[in-house]
Amino acid sequence: MSRRQHSHRTDALNASPRRRGRAPAFDLVEQLERRQMLAANAFVESTGRLVVWGTAGNDAITVSKDPKNAANVLVNANGKTWSFASKVVKNV
């Protein structure tokens, strides 16, 4: 590549998008609407209350004793499972 070709290439790369006749890159990115990941959640409050939050959809939620370990309570919501020590769960 000749010195003249290299110089032209470097100038083109360093030029601002407006100088090259193109819109700035941020003008080319489409804005998306605000989105939320809707997922169920389970936790135990400091008072010992087991709280299970569902989604706006038709959730499948079960609360049961762990058949493999009676010292735990299991919460299954839409296929995701949480395990809590029975001694910390006072109410649901």
Image (spheres, rainbow, N blue to C red):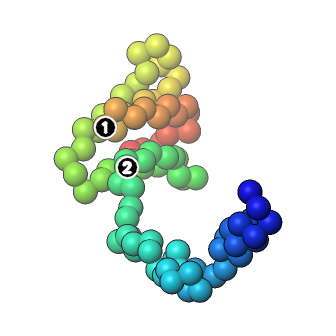
Q: What is the x, y in percent for residue 40?
A: 37, 47
Q: Quadrant of the N terminus?
A: bottom right
Nearest to the observer: residue 35 or residue 74: 35
List the residue tagged with mark 1: 78
What residue appears at the point 71 percent right and 66 percent down from the top-left corner? 5
Task: Kindly tell me whether residue 63 is visible in this rendering.
Answer: no
Q: Secondary structure at mark 1?
A: loop
Q: Amino acid at mark 2?
A: Ala
List the residue tagged with mark 2: 39
Quadrant hosting residue 4: bottom right
Task: Work out how far the residue at label 2 is from the one at label 1, CA to CA, in angstroms.
Answer: 9 Å
Residue at the limit of the structure toward the left, as seen here: 58
Q: Residues within 10 Å of mark 2 (few under 14, many from 20)?
A: some
Q: Amino acid at mark 1?
A: Asn
What residue appears at the point 24 percent right and 44 percent down from the top-left corner? 59
Circles 2, 1 touching at the beta carbon (< 8 Å)? yes
